[in-house]
Image: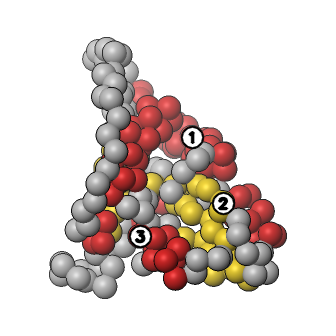
Amino acid sequence: MTLSYTGIKGGIVLVSADDPAMHSSQNEQDNRHYAKFAKIPMLEPSDSQEAKDFVSKALKISEKFDTPVLLRITTRIAHSEGRVKLFERVKNKKEYKFDKNPQKFVMIPAYARKRHVIVEDRLKKIERYSEDTELNKIELDSRDIGIITSGISYQYSKEVMTEASFLKLGMSYPLCKEKIYNFAKKVKKIFVIEE
């Protein structure tokens, strides 16, 4: 939680592996709540390729907004395998040095209260970003049914509802409320599908 307040130099991605329906663990913990609680963005890949690609995207978001990013995978993604396309590694040429800035990095109450305002403002900026990012995409097909989904549920839904329209949320927090509203206006019925 404090890391959300201090921000970071460079980028940091926190990977969470949830287990809906307890297929391979002792609990059904839903870590989506942590993103909202910490006021940090959350990405949810829907396959192996996205799991790889979203790490890079998450790092860029982290650096852009000075925040940790939660990459949430679930059992089906964690246990899956598939071919992925690699891209040429880009070395970060930035140099990060120690920044003696106690007002930013030491969270005593007096500093934390000031940082809280910054965290709330940052979350609003990330919400605006979520409206335009390619991570959240609309796929229009039949206007009879619209499906809003994320993660592996997107793949399952596409397999079954081949002619439905989709709003795939690659960045599921903060929500792209305007995009959801605009998508809902384009279809007759909406279904929200989650794992």
Q: Nearer the viewer, mark 1 or mark 2?
A: 2
Q: Secondary structure at mark 3?
A: helix
Q: Is residue 154 above or below residue 14?
A: below
Quadrant including the C terminus: bottom left
Residue 31: quadrant of the picture:
bottom left
Hey, what amino acid is under mark 2? Ile
Residue 26 x %, y %: 18, 81
Which residue occupies 34% across, 25% down? 90
Position of residue 11 in the picture relative to residue 144 (left or right):
left
- Label 3 neighbourhood size at 10 Å, few (<14), some (14-19), many (20+)? many
Q: Which residue is mark 2?
A: 138
Q: Nearer the viewer, mark 1 or mark 3?
A: 3
Q: Earlier in the sequence, mark 3 or mark 2?
A: 2
Which residue occupies 33% across, 79% down? 20
Q: Earlier in the sequence, mark 1 or mark 3?
A: 1
In the drawing, what numbered circle is on residue 161? none
Hey, what amino acid is under mark 3? Ile
Hey, what amino acid is under mark 1? Arg
- Label 2 neighbourhood size at 10 Å, few (<14), some (14-19), many (20+)? some
Q: Secondary structure at mark 1?
A: helix
Q: Which residue is mark 3?
A: 152
Q: Which residue is mark 1?
A: 122
Q: Earlier in the sequence, mark 1 or mark 2?
A: 1
